[in-house]
Image (cartoon, rainbow, N blue to C red):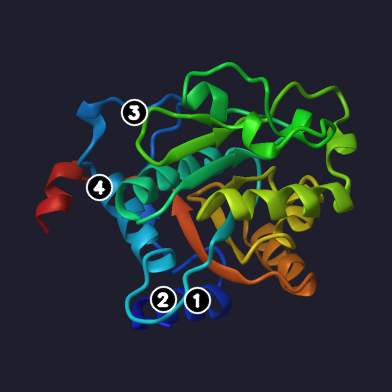
């Protein structure tokens, strides 16, 4: 394991959750796909660092192939972080990437990538066809999307543990990397259930938003379920001076 990844993992499991040691991201709040003019911001730089530390490890260390992004609570910006990380990984990794909208409570990745919501995750959990048929290219080379699909008022029917394991085994065979967007862990049990199918999770904490106790409980919930916490992201941090000046510092 590389030194940078050691630091990311150690700090994520040692430091107070409201002050995570992983990248601090000044991210916009709108769920829209960024245009080329948005590239090169401090947020992009931090997303690139996150991808490098977690997925693109030097030497003989095997990087995690399946990672869930889990917001501590609603409004932390988890979906945005997951989507941007998938794009950055697809641009840098030697392999195929699939980003999965498993946030059946409040799906948004179809809006981010500007595609129809179906077919998708919910349908793949019930339909016997190969799971690859439910994914679609995003327009970004090497990046595929599995949207949430059409979800009813109560999505628990799409979260059958045995079916989830079977479908995720298929996805592991089809793609080199899977990035999963989940519902907030403080509100629903879905994130922990999905986390058990991964190689680890990344907690997304909202700056000046997420409280200390829910963050600690979220971390402890994953640890109790034997899910590795790979790191944490402090999202939507505000800056007292213009971002351009920070980039020169």
Q: Rate crowding at label 1 as few (under 14), some (14 to 19) or many (20 or more) other CA atoms within 10 Å.
A: many
Comes first in the chain, label 2 or label 3: 2
Residue plotted at (46% across, 55% down): 234
Comes first in the chain, label 3 or label 1: 1
Q: Can residue 69 be seen from the camera position used here?
A: no
Question: Which labelled disc corresponds to residue 42?
Answer: 4
Q: Which residue is mark 2?
A: 5
- Picture coordinates of residue 91 (x, y %)? 31, 46
The count of marks equals 4
In the image, 31 versus 138, the foreground residue is: 138
Q: Which residue is mark 1?
A: 9
Which image quadrant for residue 125? top right
Q: Are marks 3 and 1 in contact (CB under 8 Å)?
A: no
Q: Which residue is mark 3?
A: 34
Q: Is residue 113 above or below residue 21?
A: above
Marks 4, 3: nearer the viewer: 3
Residue plotted at (62% across, 55% down): 172
Q: Can residue 214 be seen from the camera position used here?
A: yes
Question: Which labelled disc corresponds to residue 191?
Answer: none
Comes first in the chain, label 4 or label 3: 3
User: What's the distance in space between the residues labelled 4 and 3, CA to CA?
Assistant: 14 Å
- Picture coordinates of residue 45 (x, y %)? 26, 52
User: What's the distance in space between the residues labelled 1 and 4, CA to CA?
Assistant: 22 Å
Q: Is residue 56 left or right of residue 195?
A: left
User: What's the distance in space between the residues labelled 2 and 3, CA to CA?
Assistant: 28 Å
Q: Rate crowding at label 3 as few (under 14), some (14 to 19) or many (20 or more) other CA atoms within 10 Å.
A: few
Comes first in the chain, label 1 or label 4: 1
């Amino acid at each position: 394991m590389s030194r940078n990844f050691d630091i990311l993992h150690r700090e994520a499991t040692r430091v107070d959750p409201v002050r995570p040691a992983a990248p601090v991201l000044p991210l916009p709040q709108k769920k829209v796909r960024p245009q080329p003019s948005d590239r090169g911001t401090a947020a992009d730089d931090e997303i690139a660092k996150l991808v490098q530390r977690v997925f693109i490890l030097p030497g003989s260390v095997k990087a995690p192939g399946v990672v869930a992004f889990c917001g501590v609570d609603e409004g932390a910006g988890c979906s945005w972080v997951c989507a941007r990380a998938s794009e950055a990984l697809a641009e840098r990794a030697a392999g195929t990437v699939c980003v999965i909208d498993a946030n059946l409570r409040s799906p948004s990745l179809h809006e981010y990538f500007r595609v129809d919501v179906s077919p998708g995750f919910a349908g793949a959990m019930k339909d016997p066809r190969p799971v690859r048929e439910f994914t679609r290219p995003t327009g970004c080379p090497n990046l595929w999307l599995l949207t949430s699909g059409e979800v009813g008022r109560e999505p628990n029917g799409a979260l059958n543990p045995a079916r989830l394991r079977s479908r995720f085994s298929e996805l592991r065979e089809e793609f080199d990397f899977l990035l999963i967007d989940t519902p907030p862990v403080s509100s629903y049990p879905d994130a922990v259930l999905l986390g058990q199918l991964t190689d680890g999770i990344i907690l997304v904490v909202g700056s000046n938003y997420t409280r200390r106790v829910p963050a600690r409980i979220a971390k402890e919930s994953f640890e109790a379920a034997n899910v590795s916490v790979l790191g944490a992201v402090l999202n939507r941090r505000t800056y007292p001076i213009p971002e351009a000046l920070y980039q020169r510092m």
